[in-house]
Image (cartoon, grey):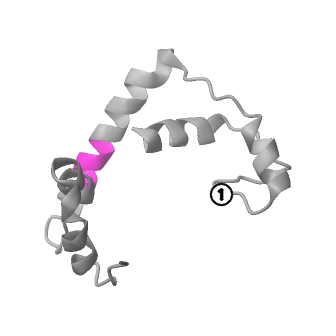
Amino acid sequence: MVSVLANSYDRYARLLNGTHKSHVHSPEEASALAKYKPEINTTLLVTDLKRMEVAAKETVEYFNSTEHICIMKILSENHTKLGDVLEFLRLPQMV
């Protein structure tokens, strides 16, 4: 849901000092970003959610013949499964 809203916002975004910022790297950027108060366009929200749902289904179908796992589904069903996800991605587990 967050990524849908972020993508929807990015489409119409006014950039921070002329560049897109998904992460800040200084107190000044953090201050500028903290002043932003997002507004959800409720008129487009349902349309955007439906479009993203179709895109997600098409992506899964496209990659159906490759080894993959649905990380969000796994973690939403059982947050203790992060170790399985990291193992699949061949990433070390942080203790």
Query: Does residue 11 appear in the picture of this structure?
Result: yes
Q: How many marks?
A: 1
Vertical side of 22 occupied by 87: above or below: below
Farthest residue to the top: give it: 43
Q: Is residue 70 visible?
A: no
Specify the quadrant of the image occupied by residue 49: top left
In magenta stretch: residue 48: no
Of the pair 23 and 62, the residue shown nearer to us: 23
The residue indicated by pointer 1 is 23
Along the line of sight, the residue nearer the viewer: 16 or 43: 16
Q: Classify mark 1: residues with Cα within 10 Å, few (<14), some (14-19) or many (20+).
A: few
Residue 43 % position (x, y): 49, 15
Q: Residue furthest front?
A: 95
What range is drawn magenta here?
A: 54-59
Q: Is residue 51 left or right of residue 8?
A: left
Residue 57 lies in the magenta-colored region: yes
Q: Which residue is located at x 23 percent, y 80 percent?
A: 87
Question: Residue at the location (20% across, 51% down)?
Answer: 73
Q: Position of residue 66 (x, y in %)?
A: 18, 74
